[in-house]
Structures are given as structure tokens and as C-alpha cells.
Amino acid sequence: MWPRIGGLRTLALGTPGEMRSNLNALVLAGVKTATAGLLTGEYAAENEELEHVGERLALVDDHDKLIGVVVVTGVEVVRFADVPWDFARSEGEGDRSIEEWREGHRRYWHREGFPVDDDTQVVCIRFRLVSAGDGGIDTGDLGT
């Protein structure tokens, strides 16, 4: 299971270090309003349920410190080959085309040990930032 803070599941974007810092900055700036995960990868490996519309997630840094709260506005599971450009653009990472998005995500997931093909199921999550900082959440309640 993913860690919890104040009863909220955590949202730890990308990999720790520069990547996570950059992705978090994009969320806090309101540029990144979506993220993708692998149904048979991250979710299955952690025995984690899909997010649901209205769920609040604790955005965390490399040290599981709460830096913001987002609310899920949409969840859809689609084939990797069917991820729409509108969604990919919402990830806010500067991709100039759906092909560029697919290639970058294919490389990322392969590095993480989850090779993908066109039929791999991708969880497309849309969200909006509702608070920056700790959002009044008890950050001492980090547990699994």
C-alpha cells in the first residue's frame, strides 16, 4: 500500500530527486493537472485501488513531506496506444506531441521495470491543486 498522511493516500510523482522536484513544481504552479500510472505495474505491485473522483491526495516530496493537496477530478483506464493528446498535454511536462509523450513514458516505465506495449493498461488521473503546504493535515500521521 502507498503511505498515508492524515488519512489521505500520497501522490509521489516520478522518481525521487530532480524529476520529482520538477513535477511537484509544475503541480504547485497549476501547470500539471494530470498524471499516469500502470494498472498492472504500480497499482498491482502495491496492491492499491484506483483513485476516485473527489478523492484528495497528499502531494509529497522525496522525504514523504506533505507539500500540497490535490483533488481527483477524473480517472480513466485506457490502452497505452489510446491515451489521448488532451490528457498527455495536461501532464504539463512539455511534450510537443502524443508520440513524444508515449516515447518518454515508455522509457520511464521501462527504467522502472515495467515495459509497456500498445495494450498496456494506463490509469489516467486528472486533478486540481486545492492547497499548497500542509493544508491543515496532521503530517505526523504518516503510516502505511
Image: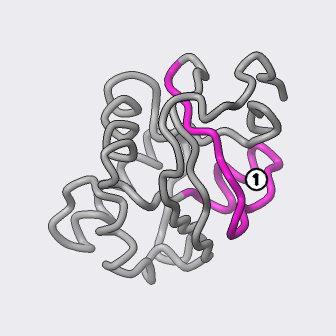
Where disc 1 sits, the SS reads helix
Identify whether 108 is placed above or below 105: above
Count of marks placed on residues: 1
- Measured as percent of width and height from the top left, residue 112 is found at 50, 39
What residue sits 60% from the left and 57% below the top? 71
Q: In this view, does 4 lie to the left or right of 16?
A: right
Q: Is residue 12 magenta?
A: no
Q: Is residue 134 left or right of residue 22?
A: right
What residue sits 52% from the left and 61% below the top? 127
What residue would you read off at disc 1?
44
Amino acid type of the residue that numbered disc 1 sits on in the rendered structure: Ala
Which span is picked out in magenta? 37-62
Towards the viewer: 23 or 84: 23
Towards the viewer: 29 or 46: 29
Q: Residue furthest front?
A: 136
Identify whether 140 is placed above or below 137: above
The N terminus sits in image quarter: top right
Towards the viewer: 7 or 2: 7
Identify whether 46 is placed above or below 128: above
